[in-house]
Image (cartoon, coloured by chain):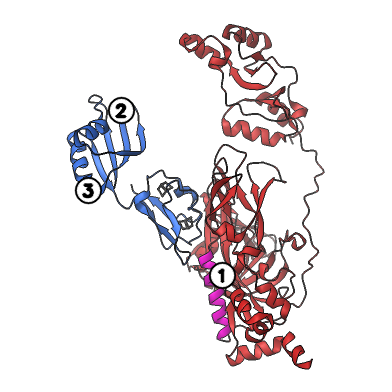
Amino acid sequence: MKLLVTFSRKGGREPVIARTVKETGVLINVERAHIDSVAGEVLVDVPDSDSDLVCSKMREFGATVRILVDSVRRDEDECVDCGACISICPKDVFSFDDEWRLTLTEERCVLCGKCVPACPHHALSLMQ
Amino acid sequence: MNDKKYFMQKSIDLINTRIRDGNARVVTAEEMPAIVDELGEEGALHEVDVVTTGTFGAMCSSGAFFNFGHSDPPIRMERVWLNDVEAYAGVAAVDAYLGATQLSETKGDRYGGAHVLEDLVAGKTIELRAFSKGTDCYPRTTLKTEITLDDLNQAVMCNPRNAFQRYGAATNASSDRVMNTYMGSLLPNCGNVSFSGAGVLSPLANDPQLRVIGSGVPIFLCGAPGMVIGEGTQSSPASGFANLMVTGNMPGMTTDFLRAATFTGYGVSLYVGLGIPIPVVDLDVVRSTAVRDEDITTSIIDYGVPSRDRPVLRDVSYAELRSGSVEIGGEEVKTSSMSSFRKAREVAAALAGWVREGKMELFLPTRHLDTATRVHPLRETEHVPRVREIMQRSIPCIGEDEEIRTAARTLLKGETNHLPVLDADGRVVGIVTTYDISKAVVSPGSGKRVADIMTRRVIRTTPEEAVDIAARKLELNNISALPVVDDNGHIIGLLSAIDLGKLFGGRWSR
Ligand code: SF4
Ligand code: SF4
């Protein structure tokens, strides 16, 4: 399961991820991170069974945690099933089914945003 | 003998009689290869009357003629805008041609001619603006009104270049940034391959000799019945890149088969659904419609090279392209398509429905297309300036092991801001600027040698590169000079923004 963790660094430099790993013993996979001097946004992947534990621990450390479900969305009226998005996505979110219809495996999405401008039909958007 | 001859061909009249009677056997081009395998060529000729083809992809060279009707008082529209997208009005007096790629004057590349066409077909209201200087017979000078497709006397789609037999596939091997092209986003270092075309379903791939596709042949165009006008512009059947000029009336078209699109960083285009029913009149038609994706090949071209004759990396079949990945130089590279195979199937299936239900009869070409036509490049009479003509030849350089202080002195003496850094063999390995040196002075911890502070990722040019291309490199990388190197990477000059300024201020000024 993918979690979007955001935290402010104003009140000291609490190593949120490291402490969560240490205290829960859950192995957290960092997929994407953007951290500057005042705030951080980290996208992590955790086993589904441990997600409750990880979420509550991180919140305890002052982080905001959001579970990503429909991270990338496709507008079916606009999509023409061309497949231009398929080779752009670094996480293989897009593929064709047997009928050459585009299918999405949203769980894999890390919200990198590359697919959005690559779709000629403006059919893709990211969770806000 | 007579018996056999009967099986060798079938008249178009017989096919049309069967269509009228509702007994024509119609299959799609995707189904045909298996039928020929099963029944043999003669069996397939006997069994199949019509093979339908289809394609759905970006076809930039599309547009429509409109006749708006006369206003009171009348105006001779000299310039015309539809939702702020200008249409060509030099076809007097209330006619205009709207091209799909023309951009809106207010919304930039988010809206263009293709969007106007889609909005009209969707039944939306469009703002029409026109301007004229006024004449005795057409006194009015301005006009602004709202129209829908139903209000127009004619709205005739007329596409100069559609349905290429096949398209070159694109990758980006030579540029280290994402390229935004009409073939979509091309990731650096051969990060992906983008292709277009319906392969096995492509109309012209099923008749590469242009025997049954030609002027006057009925087609499916964006959901409405249409017709082949003739050879498309830039058509090149002799090199396997034929295309068609086609027409059809916009009333009757649907947004299922006509869609506007935007290619980020490139512009607007129109996705067109186009299908051609092929009458199975003889064994040659059986053979040409038995073509498979495996048999249709194209080239993977390096779009990273900014010239007309881009290098071909390898040949590839549509079967490989459609498989999801291809190999380039030992690496698996993901492929994706700009055109929709699912929609191409829908076109071929819808067209097959029309023929089965007797809604469309077939005709042989009233005029055949010339299979010997081959496209040739533009004749350029103005000289295209090259880097070697404006670069500075005697320029100060520095060795990578020299001290920063020496570099500073060289810069001052040479009255320049850029110092190419050379290795012992005279090859460019970096560049230092006055900015780099100032930075080193402020934070002295960074090292003493030029190699410690130089920029190692040097954007270069070559003496034969067109000045336009070099100028674009400066702009895209936000830099102000490019070392000019020969084939071996040896320095031979420097091209700076100042040299460009001289050129643009001189020969190119009007
Ligand atoms: S690029 Fe856009 S239109 Fe094409 S398949 Fe992907 S989402 Fe659909
Ligand atoms: S946002 Fe990135 S990871 Fe998510 S689907 Fe788009 S390209 Fe793939």
Q: Which residue is mark 1?
A: B222
Mark 3, other Cα within 10 Å: few <14 / some 14–19 / many ≥20:
few
Helix, strand or loop for disc 2? loop
Tell me the magenta residue range.
B341-357
Horizontally, residue A54 falls left or right of residue B238, namely left
Instruction: Please determine whether, in this image, residue A113 is positioned above or below residue A9.
Output: below
Instruction: Please determine whether, in this image, residue B35 is positioned above or below residue B75.
Output: below
Residue A112 is inside the magenta segment: no
The amino acid at mark 3 is Ser
Which SS type dominates the magenta stretch? helix
Mark 1, ligand 1, within 8 Å: the answer is: no
Give the x, y percent position of residue A24. Answer: 20, 37
Q: Which residue is mark 2?
A: A38
Please tell me which of labels 3 and 2 falls first in the chain: 2
Classify the position of the C terminus of chain B by image quarter: top right
Q: Chain of mark 1?
A: B
3 and 1 marks on the same chain: no
Q: Chain of mark 3?
A: A
**Chain B tint as drawn:** red
Mark 1, other Cα within 10 Å: few <14 / some 14–19 / many ≥20:
many
**Chain A tint as drawn:** blue
Image mark for residue A49 = 3
Give the x, y percent position of residue A1. Answer: 29, 48
Camera-side mark, 3 or 2:
3
